[in-house]
Image: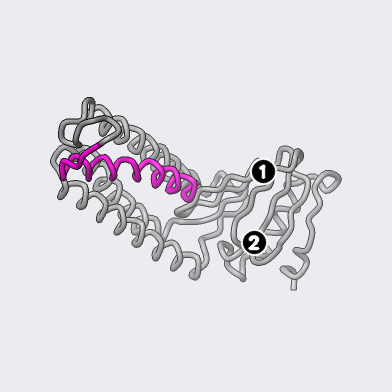
């Protein structure tokens, strides 16, 4: 979820930044026979890109916080496992990097022109929100396994439902969940601490139908 959202935000940011530069330096726009500062509907274009980016940020933020709140309700899960130390370090590093990039983007937009203030404030706000989420969640990020689904809550939110599940397997440090109609979900096995993998597998085997779901290549976890 996080990678997809960041990718779409980047796609929207490129024309937003280009438009901001043209406006800030009043560069000629030959195709429209005008300049950036005189471009019709420039405020509306800036606002449109800003709203789309804000919606993406908000959607991601709501989902991440909801996942964090859900896994904190330990009574709802058969097993609730805190993230491994290695995964926490990765989440912290990426979270700090992401917030730093968004902060620089916001500051850059604001420095170019006051007309991009709304977009700059969106990036600055969610840079701060992302930093707070990362630091607050460091001791709360976990993976919960219930009778209906698996929820992995860290900077990425992964929800694995059992409906339609056909195969669970490990390949190249990734736990894969294969469904009917070629759907495949996954998350890194480094999310689960080594000492908790046996417990995770045992509870997974309890909740899935062995006649419909093949649990493959997880046998080494039992050693």
- Looking at the magenta stretch, what is its main secondary structure? helix
At label 2, counting other C-alpha atoms closer than 10 Å, the crowd grade (few under 14, some 14-19, many 20 or more) is: some
Q: Residue at 15% x, 50% y: name it.
A: 111
User: Above or below — where is 94 with respect to 122?
Assistant: below
Is residue 60 one of those drawn in magenta?
no
Is residue 22 one of those drawn in magenta?
yes
Q: Which of marks 2 and 1 is in front?
A: 2
**Which disc, if any, is residue 147?**
1
Q: Is residue 77 left or right of residue 42?
A: right
Q: Residue at 43% x, 56% y: name it.
A: 140
Alpha carbon of mark 2 to alpha carbon of mark 1: how far? 22 Å
Residue denoted by label 2: 174
User: Above or below — where is 167 with respect to 188?
Assistant: above
Furthest residue toward bottom: 223
- Coordinates of residue 56 in the picture (x, y in percent): 40, 38
169 and 120: which is toward the camera: 120
- Coordinates of residue 30 in the picture (x, y in percent): 26, 35
Point out the stretch of residues depicted in magenta: 1-29
- Coordinates of residue 173 in the picture (x, y in percent): 64, 66
User: Above or below — where is 77 with respect to 91?
Assistant: above
Q: Residue at 16% x, 41% y: name it.
A: 26
At label 1, counting other C-alpha atoms closer than 10 Å, the crowd grade (few under 14, some 14-19, many 20 or more) is: some
- Whichever of callouts 2 and 1 sits on the residue coming sooner in the sequence is 1
Q: Quadrant of residue 47?
A: top left
Q: What is the secondary structure assignment of the residue under circle 1?
A: loop
Q: Is residue 107 left or right of residue 87?
A: left
Q: What is the secondary structure assignment of the residue under circle 2?
A: strand
181 and 85: which is toward the camera: 181
**Which disc, if any, is residue 24?**
none
């Amino acid at each position: 979820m996080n990678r997809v959202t960041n990718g779409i935000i980047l796609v929207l940011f490129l024309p937003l930044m280009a438009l901001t530069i043209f406006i800030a330096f009043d560069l000629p726009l030959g195709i429209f026979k005008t300049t950036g500062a005189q471009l019709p509907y420039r405020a509306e274009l800036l606002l449109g890109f800003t709203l789309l980016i804000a919606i993406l940020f908000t959607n991601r933020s709501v989902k991440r916080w909801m996942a964090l709140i859900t896994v904190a309700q330990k009574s709802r899960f058969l097993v609730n496992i805190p993230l491994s130390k290695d995964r926490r370090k990765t989440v912290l590093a990426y979270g700090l990097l992401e917030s730093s990039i968004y902060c620089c983007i916001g500051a850059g937009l604001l420095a170019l022109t006051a007309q991009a203030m709304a977009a700059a404030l969106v990036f600055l706000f969610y840079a701060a929100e992302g930093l707070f989420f990362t630091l607050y969640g460091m001791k709360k990020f976990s993976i919960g396994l219930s009778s209906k689904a698996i929820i992995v809550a860290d900077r990425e939110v992964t929800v694995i439902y059992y409906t339609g599940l056909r195969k669970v397997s490990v390949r190249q440090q990734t736990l894969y969940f294969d469904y009917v109609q070629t759907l495949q979900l996954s998350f890194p096995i480094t999310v689960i601490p080594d000492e908790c993998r046996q417990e995770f597998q045992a509870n997974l085997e309890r909740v899935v139908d062995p006649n419909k779901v093949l649990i493959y290549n997880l046998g080494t976890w039992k050693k």
